[in-house]
Image (cartoon, rainbow, N blue to C red):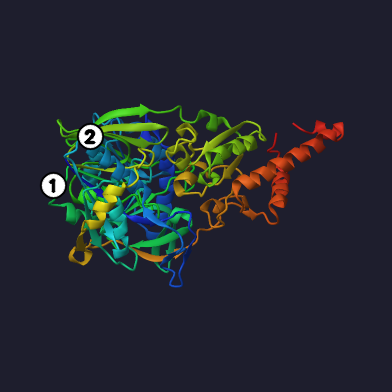
Amino acid sequence: MEKSIVLICEHANGKVSPVTYEIAAFAHELQRLSNGSLIAVVLGEHVQQAAGEIAAATGIDVLGLQIPGLENYSGEIFRDVVSEELPPLDPGYVCIAGTSQGLDFGPSLAVRLRACCISGVERIEDKSGQVVFSRAIHGGKIHANLASAARTTVLIVQPGAFRPMSAGSVKPGSISLKIMDRGSSLTRSIGLKRMQSGGSALAEARVIVSVGRGIGKKENLEIVRRLARMFPRVAVGASRPLCDIGWLDYSQQVGQTGATVTPDLYFACGISGAPQHLAGMRGSKFIVAVNTDPNAAIFNMADVCVVEDVVGFVSDLLKESDGSSEMADKSSPANEAIRP
Amino acid sequence: MRILVCAKQVRDTQAHVSIDQSGERVIVDPSAPSRMNKYDEHALEAALSVKDSLPETVVDVVCVGPSEWAPLIKRALGMGADNGIHIIADDDEYVSPWATASRIASFAMDRGYDLILTGVMSEDMMNCLTGPTVAELLALPYATSCVLVRLDVSRQVVYVEREIEGGLRDCLELRLPALLTVQSGINKPRYPTLSNMMRASRQTLETIDSASIPGPEHTEVLVGLGYPGKIGSGIVLEGSRQEKAVKLLQILREKSLLV
């Protein structure tokens, strides 16, 4: 019998998480290269609505595992339930999103299934009959291409790396629901705690000037703030290391566990571009990156690459901008009229 | 309380890296400094702060890696760890995180640790797999990406807060023994002290030959390394710094992105 390709879906508060559709797109791509029937598994306290939405949007058959009391994610219950339910499906591949959930239960699920586990998958291709998965190493400056030597492979897919499957006119997949009574004995879930408002200033900004470790000294943040003032509807963002050392607030963090942003312009100052950061800003419409390291991963995604020291370059930019705005002030009224 | 911290060595992440001729090995600029993986350093600090409040605590540090990594373990002792264990692995090729986890698990199996701490990932390989794999091999409850760790010895539990998406934290309690992977920002790692470094220099590390530990059966294999492809349209501005600034202003103006 043909082995299956299983996708584990994420949902919250009755809504399917957008990353689930990225996993669906990835699973379809994998299916083109390796065959196997697709099965989506969704688990939680209430899964009916999410199961219906996934089946309708993707055309994939859905197995809903309804677990009374499983209000929030529990690593222990996820591992127990999924490792019991999967073997009868004979999975060749298990596709999981590389989120705080997937990276939590995925690795141990692999151990239980005696599967090989590849995390951070960003690309998939066929190399002379072998399915090869690419993942970033060394801050994204290099990619490792890996193949599985195991019967079953757990693939933890990097959020943002695959374009989400768009809802097309597909024949809805079938839905089967199973109610399971499960509890946890070694861990006790206490609930979720909100730490910050979730970067609302970042979400509303049209331009984000974001700063990373390349800024060097805390005093240099001022020049980035001056740069930000050149733009309308602007917010200042940061990569994780700057929040860790307390130079900027965690509410300003852009990245996988910070804010996910899609501004018209993302101006990255001294940001190296680790996959966790890219996951939060790769949807930006136009990206300018300034970094001294010509191999910084951010340049692979940038529309405009400036290999320079941030502080020096931004000072020049401010100087040039001041000069040209003086010129603009002296120019004809007609010229002013076309300014917004 | 017996705590094990798993740590590895990395090269400075700002270092220039390239791929060698075989296409299977990463060459890191040899002048780049080596140091402890920063997430593991946070894990070690978390362990040492337990020792600060419960002085009878023993903190062991285990490292799987080549002989050259021994100074890293000495530094951990210098920071205040009690014992260092070096599982010597002079692997010249790709090492699966499962292999590393098997080595750590086989060592830790009978040592009766109450808590195992390690970084959420390594800065170079960025797998996020070793910690949870060790936990599963030892059948321990675990939590990943912890940004707060609070032990309750009388109840034999540890309360943790995991960093999750959307500015939220997932709060849970785990029964000991347990394994936690630690995220950056949880604490500020201390510097080694002179007296601890003196002690470390006299102390012998326990060494284990990784060849004595059976590896996992089937894992992933490295097909090759490559440079990532470009995604953006990627114009690289040329000229002097000032010329680049002028060009960028022109581009931003054309796109009506300026005030």
Mark 2–mark 1 Cα distance, whole angstroms, equals 21 Å
Question: Residue A288, can we see it?
Answer: no
- Circles 2 and 1 in contact, beta carbons < 8 Å: no
Tag 1, which secondary structure?
loop
- The amino acid pointed to by label 1 is Gly
Corner quadrant of residue B87? bottom left
Chain of residue at mark 1: B
> Circle 2: is it few (<14), some (14-19), or many (20+) Cα within 10 Å?
few
Q: Is residue B8 left or right of residue A209?
A: left
Q: How many marks?
A: 2
- Which structural element holds mark 2? helix
Give the labeled residue for mark 2. B53
Residue A262 to residue A312: above or below: above
Residue that label 1 marks: B112
Image-quadrant location for residue B68: bottom left
At a point 72% along the width and 51% down the height, the residue shown is B243
Q: Position of residue A99 (x, y in %)?
A: 38, 42
Residue lying at 62% horizontally and 38% vertically, measured from the top left? A223
Q: Position of residue A3 (x, y in %)?
A: 29, 56
Three-letter code for the amino acid on which mark 2 is drawn: Ser
